[in-house]
Image (cartoon, rainbow, N blue to C red):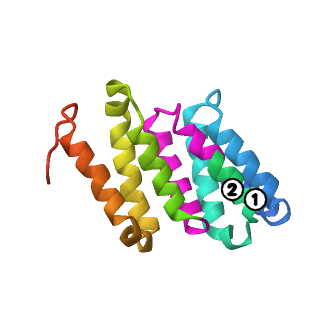
């Protein structure tokens, strides 16, 4: 019985993506960023959103990609749940494959460098470094053009006396 329910849910979802892609992606985005939704549901929504972008990225119109990207960029200012931040990184990097990857990386580096509260910066640092790692997986061709910027950012972190640096 559970298998039938799953198959029906998948068929319904595929129908929504095929027939109402923009509305479905926007709805998934809104659910993902809604902090009143429980973290497990937000996490699963993030997985669906990323996979939908991956499979349909070439068919998503530019204004929808821009809307989702701008909406997700705002989430960096308030989200602190590690799982949600990881999902956020994957979604943003998947979007970067179909849009301006340099803009996405620049936003993350600039916004993290602008965090003034040392405790907030320290709390968000693992997520930022995780984002950089994920970005390298999704957009490896963008690393060469961002190399100098990444080195400057990482050097700033190493020189910051608020952090303990361990080299592996």
How packed is label 1: few (under 14 Cα within 10 Å), some, or many (20 or more)? Answer: few
Q: Which residue is mark 2?
A: 66
Checking the image for residue 63, the label placed there is 1
Checking the image for residue 125, the label placed there is none
Q: Residue at x 33, y 65 (%)?
A: 147
How packed is label 2: few (under 14 Cα within 10 Å), some, or many (20 or more)? Answer: some
Q: Quadrant of residue 121?
A: top left
Q: Which residues are magenta?
A: 71-99
Q: Are marks 1 and 2 in contact (CB under 8 Å)?
A: yes
Queried whether the magenta region covers residue 162, the answer comes back as no
| Residue 105: % across, % down | 46, 56
Residue occupying the far left of the picture: 167
| Residue 35: % across, % down | 61, 29
Queried whether the magenta region covers residue 89, the answer comes back as yes
Question: Is residue 6 shown to the viewer in this render?
Answer: no
Question: Is residue 40 shown to the viewer in this render?
Answer: yes
| Residue 127: % across, % down | 39, 43
Q: Quadrant of residue 19?
A: bottom right
Q: Foreground residue, 158 or 40?
A: 158
| Residue 26: % across, % down | 75, 49
Side (left or right) of 156 relative to 3: left
Side (left or right) of 139 relative to 98: left
Q: Residue at x 31, y 50 (%)?
A: 153
Q: Foreground residue, 59 or 40?
A: 59
């Amino acid at each position: 019985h559970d298998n039938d329910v799953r198959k029906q849910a998948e068929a319904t979802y595929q129908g929504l993506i095929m027939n109402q892609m923009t509305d479905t992606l926007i709805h998934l985005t809104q659910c993902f960023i809604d902090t009143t939704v429980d973290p497990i549901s937000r996490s699963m929504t993030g997985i669906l959103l990323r996979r939908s972008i991956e499979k349909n990225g070439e068919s998503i119109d530019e204004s929808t990609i821009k809307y989702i990207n701008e909406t997700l960029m705002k989430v960096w200012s308030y989200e602190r749940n590690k799982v949600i931040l990881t999902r956020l990184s994957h979604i943003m990097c998947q979007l970067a494959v179909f849009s301006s990857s340099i803009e996405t990386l620049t936003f993350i580096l600039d916004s993290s460098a602008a965090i003034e509260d040392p405790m907030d910066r320290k709390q968000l640092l693992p997520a930022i470094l995780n984002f950089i790692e994920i970005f390298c997986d999704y957009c490896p061709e963008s690393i060469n053009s961002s190399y100098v910027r990444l080195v400057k950012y990482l050097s700033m972190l190493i020189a910051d006396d608020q952090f303990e640096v361990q080299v592996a």
